[in-house]
Amino acid sequence: MNYDLEIYDTTLRDGSQGEGINFSVQDKLRLAERLDGFGIQYIEGGWPGSNPRDLEFFELARRRKWKNSRLAAFGSTRRKNVPVAEDDQVALLLAAETPVVTIFGKTWLLHVKEVLRATPDENVRMITDTIRYLKAQGKYVIYDAEHSIDGFKDCPDYALATWQAAAEAGADNITLCDTNGGSLPGEVAEATARLRAKVRAAIGIHTHNDIGLGVANALAGVGAGAVLVQGTMNGYGERTGNCNLITTIPNLAVKLKKNCLPAASLAKLRDLSLFVDETANLRHDPRQPWVGETAFAHKGGMHVNAVQKVSRSFEHVDPSLVGNYRRVLVSDMSGRSNIVMKAQELGFQISNDTPELKMILNEIKDLEHKGYEFEAAEGSLIVLMRRCLTQVKPKFDLEAYHVSMRRASGHSICEATVKILVDGRRAHTVAEGDGPVNALDSALRAALSQFYPKLAHVQLIDYKVRILDGAEGTAARTRVLIVTGDGKKEWGTVGVSANIIEASLQALSDSMEYCLMNHS
Protein backbone atom coordinates (compact mmCIF):
# COMPACT_ATOMS: atom_id res chain seq x y z
CA MET A 1 0.00 0.00 0.00
CA ASN A 2 1.23 3.48 -0.84
CA TYR A 3 1.15 6.01 1.99
CA ASP A 4 1.60 9.77 2.06
CA LEU A 5 3.95 9.23 4.98
CA GLU A 6 5.02 6.37 7.22
CA ILE A 7 5.12 5.76 10.97
CA TYR A 8 8.26 4.50 12.70
CA ASP A 9 7.69 3.20 16.21
CA THR A 10 10.57 3.15 18.69
CA THR A 11 8.62 2.21 21.83
CA LEU A 12 10.64 -0.97 22.24
CA ARG A 13 13.94 0.90 22.19
CA ASP A 14 13.70 4.64 22.87
CA GLY A 15 10.46 4.23 24.81
CA SER A 16 11.97 1.60 27.10
CA GLN A 17 14.52 4.19 28.25
CA GLY A 18 11.78 6.06 30.08
CA GLU A 19 11.76 5.99 33.87
CA GLY A 20 9.60 3.16 35.17
CA ILE A 21 9.48 1.33 31.82
CA ASN A 22 10.90 -2.18 31.82
CA PHE A 23 9.82 -4.55 29.06
CA SER A 24 10.62 -8.25 29.17
CA VAL A 25 11.43 -10.08 25.93
CA GLN A 26 7.90 -11.49 25.86
CA ASP A 27 6.50 -7.99 26.46
CA LYS A 28 8.43 -6.71 23.47
CA LEU A 29 7.22 -9.53 21.26
CA ARG A 30 3.59 -8.96 22.28
CA LEU A 31 3.92 -5.22 21.65
CA ALA A 32 5.58 -5.77 18.28
CA GLU A 33 2.82 -8.15 17.19
CA ARG A 34 0.16 -5.65 18.27
CA LEU A 35 1.91 -2.81 16.41
CA ASP A 36 2.20 -5.00 13.33
CA GLY A 37 -1.52 -5.78 13.48
CA PHE A 38 -2.26 -2.07 13.83
CA GLY A 39 -0.36 -1.34 10.63
CA ILE A 40 2.75 0.52 11.84
CA GLN A 41 5.24 0.47 8.95
CA TYR A 42 8.47 0.29 10.98
CA ILE A 43 9.08 -1.23 14.41
CA GLU A 44 12.44 -0.56 16.01
CA GLY A 45 13.10 -3.64 18.10
CA GLY A 46 16.11 -2.44 20.05
CA TRP A 47 19.87 -2.12 19.98
CA PRO A 48 21.37 -5.62 19.60
CA GLY A 49 24.78 -4.33 20.62
CA SER A 50 23.63 -2.96 23.96
CA ASN A 51 22.11 -5.81 25.98
CA PRO A 52 21.29 -9.56 25.89
CA ARG A 53 17.54 -8.86 26.06
CA ASP A 54 17.54 -7.17 22.66
CA LEU A 55 19.68 -9.93 21.18
CA GLU A 56 17.12 -12.48 22.34
CA PHE A 57 14.26 -10.38 21.00
CA PHE A 58 15.73 -10.29 17.50
CA GLU A 59 16.48 -14.02 17.62
CA LEU A 60 12.83 -14.79 18.44
CA ALA A 61 11.48 -12.12 16.08
CA ARG A 62 13.23 -13.79 13.13
CA ARG A 63 10.94 -16.80 13.57
CA ARG A 64 7.75 -14.77 13.23
CA LYS A 65 5.96 -13.55 10.14
CA TRP A 66 5.19 -9.85 10.07
CA LYS A 67 2.17 -8.76 8.05
CA ASN A 68 2.47 -4.99 7.88
CA SER A 69 5.67 -3.94 9.65
CA ARG A 70 9.36 -4.04 8.85
CA LEU A 71 11.59 -4.62 11.88
CA ALA A 72 14.56 -2.34 12.40
CA ALA A 73 17.70 -2.94 14.43
CA PHE A 74 19.20 0.21 15.92
CA GLY A 75 22.84 1.09 16.38
CA SER A 76 25.49 3.69 15.73
CA THR A 77 28.01 4.53 13.07
CA ARG A 78 31.31 2.71 13.27
CA ARG A 79 33.63 3.68 16.08
CA LYS A 80 36.39 6.19 15.59
CA ASN A 81 39.55 4.68 14.07
CA VAL A 82 37.88 1.26 13.60
CA PRO A 83 37.22 -0.07 10.06
CA VAL A 84 33.51 -0.64 9.64
CA ALA A 85 33.94 -4.31 8.71
CA GLU A 86 35.74 -4.87 12.02
CA ASP A 87 33.29 -2.98 14.25
CA ASP A 88 31.58 -5.43 16.63
CA GLN A 89 28.37 -3.45 17.08
CA VAL A 90 27.93 -3.08 13.30
CA ALA A 91 28.35 -6.85 13.01
CA LEU A 92 25.60 -7.33 15.59
CA LEU A 93 23.29 -5.09 13.57
CA LEU A 94 23.70 -7.43 10.62
CA ALA A 95 23.36 -10.50 12.84
CA ALA A 96 19.91 -9.29 13.89
CA GLU A 97 18.81 -10.10 10.32
CA THR A 98 16.27 -7.29 10.13
CA PRO A 99 15.36 -5.80 6.74
CA VAL A 100 15.90 -2.31 8.12
CA VAL A 101 18.91 -0.97 10.01
CA THR A 102 18.78 2.42 11.68
CA ILE A 103 22.02 4.06 12.72
CA PHE A 104 22.66 7.37 14.39
CA GLY A 105 25.55 9.71 13.84
CA LYS A 106 26.65 13.11 15.03
CA THR A 107 25.43 16.41 13.58
CA TRP A 108 26.42 18.86 16.28
CA LEU A 109 30.06 19.95 16.34
CA LEU A 110 29.86 20.11 20.14
CA HIS A 111 29.37 16.34 20.20
CA VAL A 112 31.88 15.67 17.46
CA LYS A 113 34.66 17.52 19.26
CA GLU A 114 33.78 17.10 22.96
CA VAL A 115 32.00 13.72 23.08
CA LEU A 116 33.45 11.71 20.20
CA ARG A 117 36.75 13.60 20.43
CA ALA A 118 36.95 13.27 16.64
CA THR A 119 37.67 15.70 13.85
CA PRO A 120 34.73 16.96 11.77
CA ASP A 121 36.09 15.10 8.72
CA GLU A 122 36.48 11.83 10.63
CA ASN A 123 32.86 12.08 11.82
CA VAL A 124 31.68 12.44 8.22
CA ARG A 125 33.73 9.37 7.22
CA MET A 126 32.20 7.38 10.10
CA ILE A 127 28.77 8.23 8.73
CA THR A 128 29.49 7.45 5.09
CA ASP A 129 31.52 4.28 5.73
CA THR A 130 28.78 2.74 7.85
CA ILE A 131 25.93 3.58 5.50
CA ARG A 132 27.82 2.27 2.43
CA TYR A 133 28.72 -0.94 4.24
CA LEU A 134 25.14 -1.60 5.36
CA LYS A 135 23.77 -0.82 1.90
CA ALA A 136 26.26 -3.26 0.40
CA GLN A 137 24.76 -5.92 2.70
CA GLY A 138 21.33 -5.25 1.19
CA LYS A 139 19.84 -3.31 4.09
CA TYR A 140 17.29 -0.52 3.98
CA VAL A 141 19.16 2.16 5.92
CA ILE A 142 17.63 4.93 7.97
CA TYR A 143 20.13 7.49 9.19
CA ASP A 144 19.12 9.19 12.43
CA ALA A 145 20.98 12.49 12.48
CA GLU A 146 21.36 12.95 16.22
CA HIS A 147 21.01 16.48 17.65
CA SER A 148 20.07 17.69 14.18
CA ILE A 149 18.24 20.85 15.16
CA ASP A 150 20.79 21.96 17.77
CA GLY A 151 23.60 21.17 15.37
CA PHE A 152 21.90 23.10 12.57
CA LYS A 153 21.37 26.12 14.80
CA ASP A 154 25.01 25.99 15.92
CA CYS A 155 26.63 25.50 12.49
CA PRO A 156 24.25 25.08 9.54
CA ASP A 157 27.00 24.37 7.00
CA TYR A 158 28.45 21.45 8.94
CA ALA A 159 25.03 19.98 9.76
CA LEU A 160 24.10 20.10 6.08
CA ALA A 161 27.45 18.53 5.15
CA THR A 162 26.76 15.50 7.39
CA TRP A 163 23.25 15.08 5.98
CA GLN A 164 24.44 15.37 2.39
CA ALA A 165 27.19 12.84 3.08
CA ALA A 166 24.60 10.40 4.42
CA ALA A 167 22.47 10.88 1.32
CA GLU A 168 25.41 10.42 -1.05
CA ALA A 169 26.40 7.25 0.80
CA GLY A 170 23.00 5.80 -0.04
CA ALA A 171 20.83 6.31 3.05
CA ASP A 172 17.21 5.55 2.20
CA ASN A 173 15.93 8.00 4.77
CA ILE A 174 17.60 10.80 6.71
CA THR A 175 15.74 11.50 9.93
CA LEU A 176 16.34 14.78 11.71
CA CYS A 177 16.38 14.33 15.48
CA ASP A 178 15.59 16.99 18.06
CA THR A 179 17.42 14.86 20.61
CA ASN A 180 17.41 17.37 23.45
CA GLY A 181 13.75 18.17 22.85
CA GLY A 182 14.24 21.90 23.31
CA SER A 183 13.57 23.24 19.83
CA LEU A 184 10.58 25.20 18.56
CA PRO A 185 8.37 24.22 15.60
CA GLY A 186 9.75 27.03 13.43
CA GLU A 187 13.31 25.83 14.02
CA VAL A 188 12.37 22.25 13.14
CA ALA A 189 10.58 23.39 10.00
CA GLU A 190 13.55 25.50 8.89
CA ALA A 191 16.05 22.66 9.26
CA THR A 192 13.74 20.19 7.50
CA ALA A 193 13.12 22.57 4.61
CA ARG A 194 16.86 23.19 4.15
CA LEU A 195 17.54 19.45 4.07
CA ARG A 196 14.73 18.85 1.60
CA ALA A 197 16.23 21.45 -0.73
CA LYS A 198 19.67 19.81 -0.60
CA VAL A 199 19.07 16.03 -0.89
CA ARG A 200 16.87 13.61 -2.79
CA ALA A 201 16.62 11.06 0.03
CA ALA A 202 13.38 10.75 1.96
CA ILE A 203 13.28 12.78 5.17
CA GLY A 204 12.10 11.71 8.60
CA ILE A 205 11.52 13.53 11.87
CA HIS A 206 12.28 12.32 15.42
CA THR A 207 11.34 14.64 18.28
CA HIS A 208 11.38 14.65 22.07
CA ASN A 209 8.97 16.33 24.45
CA ASP A 210 11.21 18.19 26.88
CA ILE A 211 9.36 21.47 26.45
CA GLY A 212 5.99 19.91 25.62
CA LEU A 213 6.32 20.34 21.85
CA GLY A 214 7.17 16.80 20.74
CA VAL A 215 3.99 16.37 18.69
CA ALA A 216 3.98 19.97 17.44
CA ASN A 217 7.57 19.66 16.26
CA ALA A 218 6.82 16.39 14.46
CA LEU A 219 3.90 18.05 12.65
CA ALA A 220 6.14 21.00 11.79
CA GLY A 221 8.63 18.58 10.25
CA VAL A 222 5.88 16.96 8.19
CA GLY A 223 4.70 20.37 7.04
CA ALA A 224 8.21 21.10 5.80
CA GLY A 225 8.59 17.84 3.90
CA ALA A 226 9.23 14.92 6.24
CA VAL A 227 7.58 11.70 5.07
CA LEU A 228 8.44 9.49 8.06
CA VAL A 229 7.53 10.24 11.68
CA GLN A 230 9.35 8.53 14.54
CA GLY A 231 7.92 8.35 18.02
CA THR A 232 6.64 6.10 20.77
CA MET A 233 3.26 4.88 21.92
CA ASN A 234 1.84 7.06 24.72
CA GLY A 235 4.97 9.22 24.50
CA TYR A 236 7.22 6.89 26.50
CA GLY A 237 10.87 7.88 26.54
CA GLU A 238 13.79 9.36 28.39
CA ARG A 239 13.25 12.47 30.54
CA THR A 240 9.78 13.77 29.63
CA GLY A 241 9.38 11.36 26.74
CA ASN A 242 9.30 11.17 22.96
CA CYS A 243 6.83 12.38 20.40
CA ASN A 244 3.57 10.65 21.31
CA LEU A 245 2.41 8.62 18.32
CA ILE A 246 -1.00 8.07 19.89
CA THR A 247 -1.55 11.83 19.59
CA THR A 248 0.42 12.32 16.36
CA ILE A 249 -1.29 9.63 14.28
CA PRO A 250 -4.84 11.06 14.45
CA ASN A 251 -3.48 14.57 13.91
CA LEU A 252 -1.82 13.32 10.74
CA ALA A 253 -4.74 11.21 9.56
CA VAL A 254 -7.69 13.37 10.61
CA LYS A 255 -6.42 16.94 10.74
CA LEU A 256 -3.80 16.86 7.97
CA LYS A 257 -5.61 14.23 5.87
CA LYS A 258 -2.42 12.18 5.49
CA ASN A 259 -2.78 8.55 4.50
CA CYS A 260 -0.44 6.90 7.00
CA LEU A 261 -2.19 3.71 8.20
CA PRO A 262 -4.64 1.04 7.02
CA ALA A 263 -8.14 2.51 6.93
CA ALA A 264 -9.48 0.32 9.75
CA SER A 265 -6.66 1.06 12.20
CA LEU A 266 -7.67 4.48 13.51
CA ALA A 267 -10.75 3.11 15.29
CA LYS A 268 -8.44 0.79 17.26
CA LEU A 269 -6.22 3.63 18.51
CA ARG A 270 -7.61 3.82 22.05
CA ASP A 271 -7.39 0.06 22.48
CA LEU A 272 -3.75 0.16 21.34
CA SER A 273 -2.95 2.94 23.81
CA LEU A 274 -4.54 1.00 26.67
CA PHE A 275 -2.74 -2.21 25.65
CA VAL A 276 0.65 -0.52 25.69
CA ASP A 277 0.05 0.97 29.15
CA GLU A 278 -1.22 -2.35 30.46
CA THR A 279 1.87 -4.13 29.14
CA ALA A 280 4.09 -1.50 30.76
CA ASN A 281 2.07 -1.84 34.00
CA LEU A 282 1.28 1.87 33.99
CA ARG A 283 -1.98 3.66 34.73
CA HIS A 284 -3.49 5.09 31.58
CA ASP A 285 -3.45 8.89 31.44
CA PRO A 286 -7.13 9.91 31.53
CA ARG A 287 -6.29 13.33 30.06
CA GLN A 288 -4.39 12.07 27.04
CA PRO A 289 -5.65 13.82 23.87
CA TRP A 290 -7.90 11.80 21.58
CA VAL A 291 -7.92 8.54 23.58
CA GLY A 292 -8.04 9.55 27.26
CA GLU A 293 -11.12 8.92 29.38
CA THR A 294 -11.70 12.66 29.70
CA ALA A 295 -10.91 13.53 26.06
CA PHE A 296 -14.62 13.73 25.25
CA ALA A 297 -15.98 14.32 28.76
CA HIS A 298 -18.39 17.22 29.28
CA LYS A 299 -19.17 18.82 32.62
CA GLY A 300 -20.35 22.42 32.24
CA GLY A 301 -24.12 22.68 31.91
CA MET A 302 -24.09 24.93 28.84
CA HIS A 303 -21.54 22.69 27.12
CA VAL A 304 -23.61 19.58 27.69
CA ASN A 305 -26.77 21.32 26.51
CA ALA A 306 -25.01 22.26 23.29
CA VAL A 307 -23.60 18.76 22.77
CA GLN A 308 -27.05 17.31 23.33
CA LYS A 309 -28.30 19.41 20.39
CA VAL A 310 -25.25 19.38 18.08
CA SER A 311 -22.35 17.17 19.12
CA ARG A 312 -19.75 18.97 17.02
CA SER A 313 -20.49 22.22 18.85
CA PHE A 314 -18.07 21.08 21.60
CA GLU A 315 -16.36 18.03 20.05
CA HIS A 316 -13.72 18.45 17.37
CA VAL A 317 -14.40 14.94 15.98
CA ASP A 318 -16.71 12.01 16.59
CA PRO A 319 -15.06 10.11 19.52
CA SER A 320 -15.70 6.75 17.85
CA LEU A 321 -13.28 7.74 15.09
CA VAL A 322 -10.41 6.78 17.42
CA GLY A 323 -12.29 4.17 19.42
CA ASN A 324 -13.25 6.54 22.22
CA TYR A 325 -16.65 7.60 23.54
CA ARG A 326 -18.47 10.59 24.96
CA ARG A 327 -18.90 10.95 28.72
CA VAL A 328 -21.18 13.34 30.51
CA LEU A 329 -20.06 14.31 34.02
CA VAL A 330 -22.39 15.23 36.82
CA SER A 331 -21.43 17.81 39.45
CA ASP A 332 -22.62 21.03 41.06
CA MET A 333 -21.85 22.67 37.68
CA SER A 334 -24.46 20.46 36.02
CA GLY A 335 -27.55 21.64 34.25
CA ARG A 336 -30.64 19.69 33.27
CA SER A 337 -28.97 18.46 30.08
CA ASN A 338 -26.13 16.87 32.08
CA ILE A 339 -28.58 14.89 34.16
CA VAL A 340 -30.70 13.82 31.20
CA MET A 341 -27.76 12.70 29.05
CA LYS A 342 -26.02 10.98 31.95
CA ALA A 343 -29.20 9.19 33.03
CA GLN A 344 -29.80 8.04 29.47
CA GLU A 345 -26.19 6.89 29.24
CA LEU A 346 -26.75 4.85 32.43
CA GLY A 347 -29.91 3.27 31.09
CA PHE A 348 -32.68 5.36 32.66
CA GLN A 349 -35.70 6.44 30.61
CA ILE A 350 -35.69 10.16 31.22
CA SER A 351 -36.21 13.40 29.31
CA ASN A 352 -36.19 17.13 29.97
CA ASP A 353 -39.86 16.83 30.94
CA THR A 354 -39.40 14.15 33.63
CA PRO A 355 -40.89 15.58 36.88
CA GLU A 356 -38.18 14.09 39.09
CA LEU A 357 -35.41 15.79 37.10
CA LYS A 358 -35.34 18.88 39.33
CA MET A 359 -35.19 16.73 42.46
CA ILE A 360 -32.18 14.81 41.12
CA LEU A 361 -30.39 17.97 40.08
CA ASN A 362 -30.94 19.69 43.43
CA GLU A 363 -29.83 16.65 45.42
CA ILE A 364 -26.66 16.24 43.37
CA LYS A 365 -25.75 19.91 43.77
CA ASP A 366 -26.43 19.77 47.50
CA LEU A 367 -24.28 16.66 47.94
CA GLU A 368 -21.44 18.05 45.84
CA HIS A 369 -21.50 21.18 47.98
CA LYS A 370 -20.95 18.93 51.00
CA GLY A 371 -17.96 17.26 49.35
CA TYR A 372 -19.40 14.39 47.34
CA GLU A 373 -17.97 13.81 43.89
CA PHE A 374 -19.67 11.55 41.35
CA GLU A 375 -17.33 11.62 38.38
CA ALA A 376 -15.57 8.45 39.55
CA ALA A 377 -18.54 7.17 41.57
CA GLU A 378 -21.18 6.23 39.02
CA GLY A 379 -22.41 3.47 41.32
CA SER A 380 -23.53 6.04 43.90
CA LEU A 381 -24.99 8.23 41.15
CA ILE A 382 -27.09 5.36 39.82
CA VAL A 383 -28.34 4.52 43.32
CA LEU A 384 -29.34 8.17 43.82
CA MET A 385 -31.09 8.44 40.45
CA ARG A 386 -32.94 5.17 40.89
CA ARG A 387 -34.17 6.24 44.32
CA CYS A 388 -35.49 9.55 42.96
CA LEU A 389 -37.01 8.15 39.77
CA THR A 390 -38.62 4.94 41.00
CA GLN A 391 -39.19 5.51 44.72
CA VAL A 392 -38.18 1.87 45.18
CA LYS A 393 -37.13 0.98 48.71
CA PRO A 394 -33.46 0.10 49.27
CA LYS A 395 -32.60 -3.59 49.27
CA PHE A 396 -31.56 -3.31 52.92
CA ASP A 397 -31.57 -0.92 55.86
CA LEU A 398 -28.47 -0.49 58.02
CA GLU A 399 -29.85 -0.23 61.54
CA ALA A 400 -26.62 -0.06 63.54
CA TYR A 401 -22.90 -0.64 63.40
CA HIS A 402 -19.98 -0.61 65.81
CA VAL A 403 -16.23 -0.68 65.19
CA SER A 404 -13.65 -1.35 67.90
CA MET A 405 -9.93 -1.91 68.19
CA ARG A 406 -8.03 -3.78 70.85
CA ARG A 407 -4.51 -5.03 71.34
CA ALA A 408 -3.86 -8.64 72.28
CA SER A 409 -0.63 -10.62 72.34
CA GLY A 410 1.22 -7.73 70.78
CA HIS A 411 -1.17 -7.44 67.82
CA SER A 412 -3.90 -4.93 66.96
CA ILE A 413 -7.28 -6.50 66.32
CA CYS A 414 -10.07 -4.62 64.53
CA GLU A 415 -13.62 -5.82 64.98
CA ALA A 416 -16.87 -4.59 63.41
CA THR A 417 -20.47 -5.35 64.26
CA VAL A 418 -23.28 -4.70 61.77
CA LYS A 419 -27.06 -5.00 62.17
CA ILE A 420 -29.21 -4.88 59.01
CA LEU A 421 -32.88 -5.25 58.17
CA VAL A 422 -34.10 -6.96 54.97
CA ASP A 423 -37.87 -7.32 54.40
CA GLY A 424 -38.56 -7.33 58.11
CA ARG A 425 -35.81 -9.85 58.90
CA ARG A 426 -32.70 -8.92 60.84
CA ALA A 427 -29.12 -10.08 60.62
CA HIS A 428 -26.49 -9.29 63.20
CA THR A 429 -22.89 -10.16 62.31
CA VAL A 430 -19.43 -9.64 63.69
CA ALA A 431 -16.16 -9.77 61.71
CA GLU A 432 -12.49 -9.05 62.23
CA GLY A 433 -10.27 -7.35 59.69
CA ASP A 434 -6.83 -5.92 58.98
CA GLY A 435 -8.23 -2.48 59.75
CA PRO A 436 -11.54 -0.91 60.72
CA VAL A 437 -12.78 -0.52 57.13
CA ASN A 438 -11.78 -4.05 56.20
CA ALA A 439 -13.61 -5.37 59.28
CA LEU A 440 -16.67 -3.28 58.46
CA ASP A 441 -16.67 -4.48 54.85
CA SER A 442 -16.46 -8.12 55.99
CA ALA A 443 -19.25 -7.71 58.56
CA LEU A 444 -21.58 -5.96 56.10
CA ARG A 445 -20.95 -8.55 53.41
CA ALA A 446 -21.48 -11.42 55.85
CA ALA A 447 -24.81 -9.98 56.98
CA LEU A 448 -26.09 -9.30 53.47
CA SER A 449 -24.93 -12.66 52.11
CA GLN A 450 -27.50 -14.37 54.34
CA PHE A 451 -30.19 -12.81 52.13
CA TYR A 452 -28.25 -12.24 48.91
CA PRO A 453 -25.73 -15.08 48.33
CA LYS A 454 -24.57 -13.45 45.09
CA LEU A 455 -22.64 -10.87 47.16
CA ALA A 456 -20.16 -13.56 48.16
CA HIS A 457 -18.37 -12.94 44.83
CA VAL A 458 -18.14 -9.16 45.30
CA GLN A 459 -14.79 -7.78 46.41
CA LEU A 460 -13.38 -4.39 47.35
CA ILE A 461 -10.74 -3.53 44.73
CA ASP A 462 -9.58 -0.03 45.60
CA TYR A 463 -10.00 2.40 48.49
CA LYS A 464 -9.06 6.08 48.38
CA VAL A 465 -9.36 8.77 51.05
CA ARG A 466 -9.16 12.53 50.58
CA ILE A 467 -9.27 15.21 53.26
CA LEU A 468 -11.61 17.95 52.03
CA ASP A 469 -10.93 20.82 54.41
CA GLY A 470 -7.48 20.34 55.87
CA ALA A 471 -7.62 23.62 57.77
CA GLU A 472 -10.00 21.91 60.19
CA GLY A 473 -7.26 19.49 61.24
CA THR A 474 -8.49 16.21 62.68
CA ALA A 475 -12.09 17.47 62.47
CA ALA A 476 -11.88 17.78 58.68
CA ARG A 477 -14.44 16.13 56.47
CA THR A 478 -13.23 13.09 54.57
CA ARG A 479 -14.28 11.79 51.17
CA VAL A 480 -13.94 8.06 50.64
CA LEU A 481 -14.03 6.60 47.14
CA ILE A 482 -14.11 2.84 46.76
CA VAL A 483 -14.04 0.62 43.69
CA THR A 484 -15.80 -2.74 43.90
CA GLY A 485 -15.95 -5.62 41.43
CA ASP A 486 -17.71 -8.93 40.89
CA GLY A 487 -15.25 -10.47 38.45
CA LYS A 488 -17.14 -9.13 35.42
CA LYS A 489 -17.34 -5.39 35.98
CA GLU A 490 -16.22 -2.72 38.42
CA TRP A 491 -18.05 0.27 39.88
CA GLY A 492 -17.18 3.25 42.08
CA THR A 493 -19.11 4.63 45.04
CA VAL A 494 -18.52 7.57 47.39
CA GLY A 495 -19.17 8.64 50.96
CA VAL A 496 -18.44 11.87 52.86
CA SER A 497 -18.31 12.53 56.60
CA ALA A 498 -16.14 14.04 59.33
CA ASN A 499 -15.92 10.44 60.52
CA ILE A 500 -13.84 8.34 58.13
CA ILE A 501 -15.59 5.17 59.23
CA GLU A 502 -18.99 6.71 58.52
CA ALA A 503 -17.81 7.90 55.09
CA SER A 504 -16.45 4.44 54.34
CA LEU A 505 -19.71 2.79 55.38
CA GLN A 506 -21.71 5.11 53.09
CA ALA A 507 -19.55 4.11 50.15
CA LEU A 508 -19.72 0.42 51.08
CA SER A 509 -23.51 0.53 51.44
CA ASP A 510 -23.94 2.21 48.06
CA SER A 511 -21.63 -0.39 46.54
CA MET A 512 -23.75 -3.27 47.85
CA GLU A 513 -26.98 -1.52 46.84
CA TYR A 514 -25.68 -0.93 43.32
CA CYS A 515 -24.66 -4.57 42.98
CA LEU A 516 -28.06 -5.81 44.15
CA MET A 517 -29.84 -3.43 41.76
CA ASN A 518 -27.93 -4.86 38.83
CA HIS A 519 -28.37 -8.51 39.82
CA SER A 520 -32.00 -8.46 40.87
Image: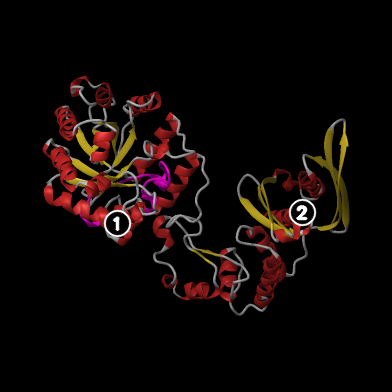
Kindly identify which numbered label has been placed on residue 500: 2
Q: Is residue 402 above or below residue 35?
A: below
In the image: residue 481, left or right of residue 8: right
As for residue 252 lying within the magenta part, the answer is: no
Question: Is the residue under label 2 in contact with that under label 1 (CB below 8 Å)?
Answer: no
Q: Earlier in the sequence, mark 1 or mark 2?
A: 1
Residue plotted at (54% across, 71% down): 300
The picture places residue 255, in percent across and down from the top left corner, at: 31, 61
Query: x%, y% of residue 131?
Result: 17, 32
Could you say whether the residue bearing mark 2 is in a helix, strand or loop? helix
Query: Hey, what amino acid is under mark 2?
Result: Ile
Residue sitting at 87 percent across and 37 percent down?
407
Q: Which residues are magenta?
A: 223-247
Q: Is residue 240 a member of the stretch shown in magenta? A: yes
Quadrant of the rendered structure where residue 223 is?
Answer: bottom left
Kind of residue sitting beneath label 1: Pro
Is residue 318 among the parts visible in the rendering? yes
Query: Eyeballing the image, is 184 above or below 242?
Result: below
Question: Can you tell which mark lies on residue 185?
Answer: 1
* Distance (Cα) linking label 1 and label 2: 51 Å
User: Viewer-proximal residue, 484 or 185?
Assistant: 185
Residue located at (13% from left, 38% from top): 165
